[in-house]
Amino acid sequence: MLNSSSFNEFLLQAFADTRELQLLHFSLFLGIYLAAFLGNGLVITAVACNHHLHTPMYFFLLNLSILDLGSISTTVPKSMANSLWDTRAISYSGCAAQLFLFVFSLGAECSLLTVMAYDRYVAICRPLHYGTLMGSRACVKMAASAWASSFVNALLHTANTFSIPLCQGNAVEQFFCEVPQILKLSCSDTYLRELGLIVVIACLVFGCFIFIVLSYVQIFTVVLRIPSGQGRHKAFSMCLPHLAVVSLFVSTGTFAYLKPPSLSSPALDLVVAVLYSVVPPAVNPLIYSMRNKELKDVLRKMIQWE
């Protein structure tokens, strides 16, 4: 029996075998990556440089954009390089780093989306206490907790996953290293240790989802009681972008990890992986800027100034 340390490298799943399709894949991923880099970069610059956007909502949006950039930079550049150079290889340490950073990004994003739901709840349901509950120190603590807990979570996942003996080869059935695909290479019952950790994390993610749902139930209950149509529109404009991002995050992630085994195939798994790991970081800035007049105005001034 071989263990994971016996491998110098892993082989990632390729999107195409022919040179033409490999270059097409490289071009598509390059376009998506540049769009994500530009969109998230503009949001980060706008929030960091404009004092009108130094509020809790935009502070958390800044953190979310940083995570989106980190998430897409973890998976896409390596896949592009492999297509360009016609290879499938990723080093052992590179695979471990990729898995760690991806799990960290997903965990921190889930935590931040939960904190952002709480921010919207306080702003709409408890406006008189907003300054106290969402002060600068409280916001920094919540963001730091999201990052720190996700770091520990990713560290545990990575350590557990790469300590499991592997004897099913080194071919990963995905275009990046992720926990379920590495576990498929195991031939030992020790994988149950990692599955137990996954169950615990899944329960925490489900708890975050329930918290977000309950927050929005109370938010919409309060919003629908607002007598002014303009007031209702403003409240919905504050909440809908976040709700859209949460829906995209939850729906793609749920389908990727909880789809029936009968629907699994290498081609479908690749497409689903792109939907939950590549598309959200690219479209999140667009979602937030479409219905946010304040952010749109700042971005428009930045673009015109440039």
Image: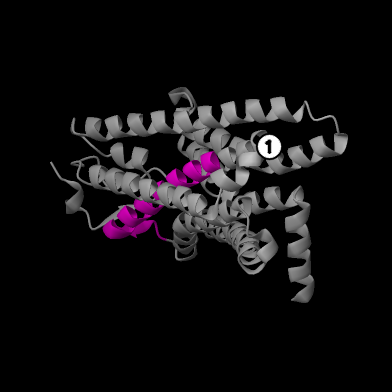
Coordinates of residue 242 in the picture (x, y in percent): 64, 42
Q: In this view, does 226 lie to the left or right of 112?
A: right
Identify whether 121 is placed above or below 134: above
Which amino acid type is shown beneath numbered disc 1?
Ile
Residue 294, magenta (yes or no):
no
Span colored in magenta: 87-115
- 293 left or right of 38 in image: right
Name the residue beneath numbered marker 1: 124
Left or right of 43? Residue 134 is left
Pick whichever, 52 or 168, lies toward us: 52
User: What kind of element bears circle 1?
Assistant: helix
Dominant SS type (magenta): helix
Quadrant in which the N terminus appears: top left
Q: Residue at x 64, y 69 (%)?
A: 49
**Can I make out residue 227 in this image?**
yes
Visual colour scheme: one colour
x and y, in percent, of residue 14 in the image: 45, 51
Residue drawn at x 61%, y 38% as measured from the top left: 122
